[in-house]
Amino acid sequence: MARPEGGGAAASERLALIGDVAGIRSATEGWRCAGERVGLVPTMGALHAGHLSLIQRCRQECDRTVVSIFVNPLQFGPGEDYECYPRRLEDDLALLRAQQVDAAFVPSVEAMYPPGATTRVRVKGIDEVLEGRHRPSHFEGVATVVLKLFNAVRPHRAYFGQKDAQQAALVERLARDLDTGVEVVVCPTVREADGLALSSRNVYLSEEERIAARRLVEALRAANRRYLEGERDPERLRGAMLTVLRAEPLARVDYAEVVDERTFQGPGPLAVLAVRIGEARLLDNHRLGDPLP
Ligand code: AMP
């Protein structure tokens, strides 16, 4: 099937906006039957350059790109930011048109979870540590929605960000364990000029908090320096991160650990952080030994 080339009018006409499971399934089914490779980029919207990097990778590797926008209530705990999570659908759709995305799947909560839908998916082990320990049932919400998106869209490939490393590892395992046939692609973290990882939640930061938020990447850099000097003791590497974070009065550390990058348990090369600054809870991570801008 021919793809419309670039160009404003063609680009703005090709985005299909679909809100129900039957609709997205029949669109992607048609593409699959025509021999086209379908890629899925799941998001919660408020799109930024991090999301765009996933979309661009998907467009390079697949014939059709589906972006889902769904703020999934199941993955938010009581007292978390579900209600005030940034929602900017019109801006997001304009971005998707400019990126020549084929379909935006934007279901309502009722379309995803009709009354009586009580099935939940768990990926045991990895969902009990770090993010899983701090946000009980968060990963159950993630695993359930991701499997539902895989079943609705039936993509050949799905794109996730290394920014949420534990989520990416959990989704890779889910895709394999449940024989989804979906190839999970994990894309590098996109950062601001000063190193802060892009996140939809960065909008919660005041000017002063935005400056304090640099400490996350600085903590990762400190651990990386020690690692490159030959330090391998996880406690000392962790200490290097905590020294940087504790010097910032606005930062409250949920965890700073150096863990195995598959299981997120036991020592390994992945430095992971969760830090609260004001109303924002920020995550970052780095595979020690790799270059960190
Ligand atoms: P979210 O909308 O926050 O649920 O993110 C949707 C996808 O984009 C997830 O796979 C995230 O890991 C990914 N993502 C978010 N921020 C970044 C970033 N700064 N760089 C790369 N990927 C990201």
Image: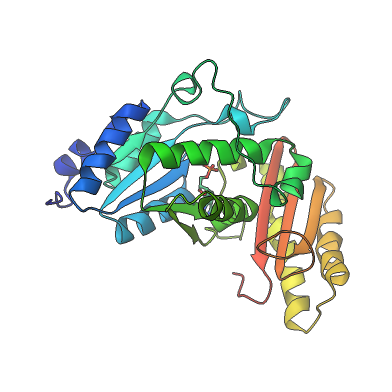
The answer to whether one can see residue 203 in this image is no
Q: Is residue 260 above or below residue 166?
A: below
Image location (x, y in percent) of residue 6: 18, 51
Image location (x, y in percent) of residue 198: 56, 50
Of 30 and 209, the residue lying toward us:
30
Of 65 and 157, the residue lying toward us:
157
Residue under the point 26% across and 46% down: 100
The answer to whether one can see residue 3 in this image is yes
Of 34 and 216, the residue lying toward us:
34
Image location (x, y in percent) of residue 251: 80, 47
Task: Tell me the quarter of the picture where residue 202 sits.
Answer: top right
Q: Does residue 245 appear left or right of residue 44 in this picture?
A: right
Q: Is residue 1 above or below residue 16?
A: below
Furthest residue to the bottom? 230
Residue under the point 55% across and 60% down: 193
Q: Does residue 160 appear left or right of residue 258 in this picture?
A: left
Residue under the point 57% across and 46% down: 199
